[in-house]
Image: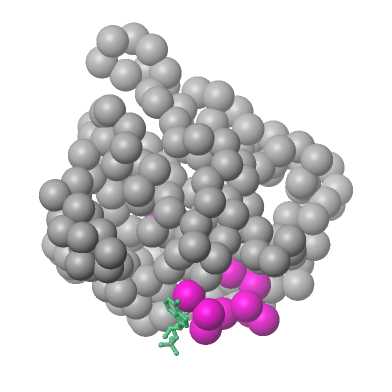
Amino acid sequence: MTGADGRCPAVPPEVLEGEQVTLRVWAVDDSEALGDLVLDNLDRLRPWMPWAAAEPLTATERLGVVESTVADRASGVASTYGIWWTGRLVGSCGAHRRIGLGGLEIGYWLAADVTGRGLATDAVATLTTAALALDDVDHVEVHVDRANGASAEVPRRLGFELVSALPHELTAPGEVGIECIWRTDAARWRRRSAIDG
Ligand SMILES: CC(C)(COP(=O)(O)OP(=O)(O)OC[C@H]1O[C@@H](n2cnc3c(N)ncnc32)[C@H](O)[C@@H]1OP(=O)(O)O)[C@@H](O)C(=O)NCCC(=O)NCCS
């Protein structure tokens, strides 16, 4: 993938520090830990994450998944991070260049036993700040199926605006097929940051 000047698009830093979490881009050495975390949480990821529909991955497949995130980052297509909290891997989030010029779409998931603490909200806030600091990014979106209330609360809590709710192809079993798009831009994000201090 290349930008308007023929170069790879800019990517956020490899490590990002939030208020509670640390985000670190996936590295090949993480593949076993990531695979174990997905396996432990497969039942709750399946309703919402298209990639979780398949059977548990073998060690080779786990490695392949992480290698593809490493390649996506090298080409600027996406930056996918492990979410670390109190020294423990607890989830993943990523910023993807799949919503057109100037935009990054953020996705996320957490292990079941760490929900309800604001960790996903912190991770998305941290990644949004880093995304909007890139020269060629002027907006960030979160796309959520209407049935996924817990997920929609994350952008809502962060002051994103719900800009559309339109029929969409079903990609995971929990979905009702209405894709809600939540968006923020630099001005909106600055206002929110000023309010939050
Ligand atoms: C979506 C998902 C990450 C949301 O997890 P979550 O724990 O609800 O989100 P957060 O970590 O931001 O925590 C928010 C909760 O912590 C509470 N909280 C506590 N301290 C907080 C803080 N400092 N900041 C924000 N919220 C805080 C909030 O009140 C909220 O609780 P509530 O839902 O009872 O109101 C999780 O449900 C998940 O992994 N789902 C499966 C995968 C998925 O659907 N991914 C998204 C696909 S679009």
Q: In which quarter of the view is residue 191 placed?
A: bottom left
Quarter of the rendering occupied by the C terminus: bottom left
Above or below residue 126? Residue 39 is below
Q: Write the residue at 64% across / 72% down.
A: 111
Q: Which quarter of the figure has residue 26?
A: top right
The foreground one among 72 and 193 is: 193
- Residue 187 visible? The answer is yes
Image quarter of the N terminus: top left
In the displayed orientation, state which residue is furthest to the front.
197
Report the number of discs. Answer: 0
Which residue: 62% across, 78% down?
114
Q: Is residue 53 above or below residue 58?
A: below
State the image coordinates of residue 2 (x, y, percent, origin top left): 37, 17
Residue 173 in view in this figure: no
Residue 116 in the image: above or below residue 184: below
Residue at 50% across, 35% down: 13
Q: For the point 57% across and 42% down, which residue is it?
A: 15
Q: Is residue 148 left or right of residue 184?
A: right
Outermost residue to the top: 6
**The one of 6 and 156 positioned closer to us in this rendering:** 156
x and y percentages locating residue 61 in the rendered image = 77, 45
Spot occupied by residue 152 in the image (x, y as percentages of width and height): 34, 74
Please check the rendered image and state whether residue 111 is part of the magenta-colored stretch, yes or no.
Answer: yes
Residue 65 falls within the magenta-colored stretch: no
What range of the chain is rendered magenta? 105-118
120 displayed left or right of 68? left
Residue 9 in picture, x, y percent from top left: 38, 23
Q: Is residue 180 left or right of residue 176?
A: left
Residue with the most extreme right position? 59
